Every structure is written in C-alpha cells, then in structure tokens.
Amino acid sequence: METASIRIDKYLWAIRVFKTRTMATEACDKGRVTIENVNVKPSRAVKVGDIIMVRKPPVVHSFKVLGLLHTRLSAEKVKEFATELTTEEELQKYHLSKIGANVIRDKGAGRPTKKDRRDITKITGFEE
C-alpha cells in the first residue's frame, strides 16, 4: 500500500522507531525529529529517499526512507522500508547507557543520590 507521501509520525511508528504514534508525535513536537537538518512537525510528509534523524537521548538515530507504509509491520519486514544509518559510536552510547548504571550500583542500595547521579554521568560520559 504505497503512496507518494505519508505523515512522519505515522511512518516512525510503522517502522518501529517509537512504540506508539503518540510518542512519535511528541518527539516531533519537542524538536527531536529532523529531515535535512530542519525540525519537523508531526504532519510533515515523508518521501522515498529522505534521511530522518531522531534524537532519543543519548543517541541520535538516522534512517533512510526506502519505501512508505501505513501499517505497522513485523521487525523483519521493516528492513524493506527503512535502512538504519546510525553510526557504531552512537549505538555504543546506547549500550553503555543500558549497562552503565547497573554495573555501578549495588543491588538493594536504593535510589541514587545527587552525587551518585553525577558520578554515573561522569563515568558513562553523557547524561541520561
């Protein structure tokens, strides 16, 4: 079911960048989604060949539009409609953020204090 264009919030939801369409819309409203280095509104039309940048702190994901789709598909079929151009450095930031806090904190230590948060940020190299 291909057409000439589709809303960016719907497209990001369909290729599984965001769990819900509402989350995709909020990301656009907050200025976290860009096409050609221009912040976009949720109603912006996406065309084949566009490169979309999505900031999901601490990582900036990049996608190239290969095809348009209106419904959410399985993860295997998404590869036919979008190619991820995210660099290895960015993906490494994501993996470090997932394991960074768990390695430092002892189990049962409770909620981190302000100093603990600063130390975690210093060690991982970015804010969460």
Image (spheres, rainbow, N blue to C red):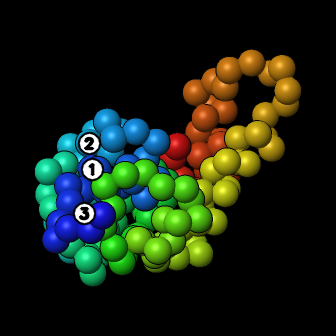
**Which residue occupies the foreground of this view, 121 or 103?**
103
The amino acid marked with disc number 2 is Thr
Image-based side of 94 in relation to 21, left or right: right
- With respect to residue 121, does 65 lie above or below? below
Cα gap from disc 3 to disc 2, whole angstroms: 13 Å
Q: Please name whichever residue, 30 or 10, is drawn nearer the observer in this view of the structure.
A: 10
- Within 10 Å of disc 1 (Cα), the crowding (few <14, some 14-19, many 20+) is many
Position in image of residue 26 (x %, y %): 28, 39
- Regarding mark 2 in the picture, which secondary structure is present there? helix
Callout in the foreground (3, 2): 2
Q: Are marks 2 and 1 in contact (CB under 8 Å)?
A: yes
- Checking the image for residue 34, the label placed there is 3
| Distance between the alpha carbons at the discs numbered 2 and 1 | 5 Å
Q: Name the residue that disc number 1 marks.
A: 9
Q: CA distance from mark 1 to mark 3?
A: 12 Å
Q: Residues within 10 Å of mark 3 (few under 14, many from 20)?
A: some
| Residue drawn at point x = 85 percent, y = 27 percent | 107
According to the image, label 2 marks what residue? 25
- Examine the rendered structure and indicate whether residue 28 appears above or below residue 108: below
Q: Earlier in the sequence, mark 1 or mark 3?
A: 1
Mark 2 vs 1, N-terminal side = 1
Q: Is residue 111 left or right of residue 9?
A: right
Provide residue 88's location: percent of width, then percent of height: 59, 75
User: In the image, what residue type sits under mark 3?
Assistant: Thr
Callout 3: SS: strand
